[in-house]
Image (cartoon, coloured by chain):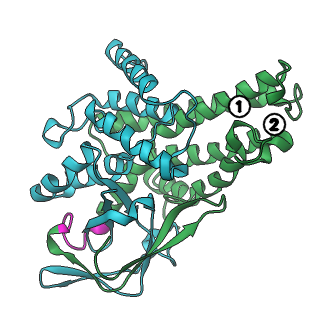
Chain colours: A cyan, B green
Amino acid sequence: MDYRFSVDEDAFRGEVKEFLRGAIPEDWDYDPFELTGETWDFAKEFTKKLASKGWVAPAWPKEYGGQGMGYMKQVVLSEELAYSRAPNTALIGVTYAGPTIIVYGNEEQKQQFIPGITSGDIVWCQGYSERNAGSDIAWLQRRAVRDGDDYVILTGASSWLGQTRTRRNTRGSATSSRQWTLRASA
Amino acid sequence: MDAPGISVRPLVNMAGEHVFNEIIFDNVRVPRKYLVGEENRGWYIGMTTLDFERSNISSAAQQRRTLEQLVEYVKEQGSGNKKHAHVNGAGNGVKPKLAELTIENEVGRYLSYRVASMQERGQIPNYESSAAKVYHSEYGQRLAGAGLKMMGLFGQLREGSKHARLRGRFARTYLTSVGSTIAAGTSEIQRGIIAQRGLGLSRI
């Protein structure tokens, strides 16, 4: 058993650190939820830089806009980004929405949603719970009912949505009977 | 989000930050082509999504940075730098506390590595990510609380005060970290998952 990172992974860590030194001001110390106005704009720019390196989701297969990079390298990247408090606006797309669509989505959905995640263009939001369910989502009451080619999310229920300062331009959504995700193009 | 019938109401957290919103649905129509997976399987898809969320490899690294900032603050107070003029209980429990927080940060990192190594092998973690999640959330609270205490009255000041230290980080995270043991499944729910899926104990 060897718990150390490989020579290749360590070299990659060095490369990431160097990129971050150039891309983030030395005194940058903002947490993701603090970003507003100018700092949010900087975050969007930074994420595009990250995307140009192919580092938004480097472990994903090439067909999904990744680099097919080893998973542990993605771990290295995530660690360095987190340590430097890098403002990565693609995080919800890469961490929650993307893997779910890749595992459960059909080909058309993958073609439609995945490229916008890896390019850093689409900011995803996550909405899970409702007023009377709180953290216990087994209590969710909202229903979507099939009506012709649509599902109708019935009136009366509400949900909480994170990363919402992008809500102006949020569009589209993926839904099933009990879980849904929204994406924004801020 | 611009579909007819969607409205948005801000939810401001106890730290005064506007991060979340409540979304009200009024008979919102969603085209059928956006259904992910099969109809009526959303619960299971949702559970998978949460497992990805709970792996949370970033938490330990963010917390390490915060811990290092606290250690630097404590070091500088002994150097006569007026910018960092105060440590509460200096030399009197501060050092063992920082040592303990360092050990705990390492433990959290390895819990995350375990989840990552499972994902690398193509396995979908469930109770293992709950263990990492509950640990990171509770550690974040311990870290924020310890920092707030060590910095004395300075620790309670937010950004905007000329006496705030470290941009008021500890005053803010002391508040924001409260929700972390509720968000993405409370610590009680995580422990329930570990007991049932990990230890095979019955639900009741």
Residue B190 locus on image (x, y percent): 52, 55
**Residue A19 lies in what quarter of the image?**
top left
The three-letter amino acid code for the residue at tag 1 is: Leu
Residue at screen point 12% across, 80% down:
A149
Residue at screen point 86% across, 20% down:
B80
Q: CA distance from mark 2 to mark 1?
A: 9 Å
Name the residue that disc number 2 marks: B150
Q: Chain of mark 2?
A: B
Q: Secondary structure at mark 1?
A: helix
The three-letter amino acid code for the residue at tag 2 is: Met
Few, some or many C-alpha atoms within 10 Å of disc 1 (few <14, some 14-19, many ≥20)?
many
Q: Are marks 2 and 1 in contact (CB under 8 Å)?
A: yes
Q: Is residue B66 magenta?
A: no
Name the residue that disc number 1 marks: B70
Front-lying residue, B146 or A92: A92
Q: Relative to B155, does residue B83 appear above or below in the rendering?
A: above
Residue at screen point 33% across, 34% down:
A50
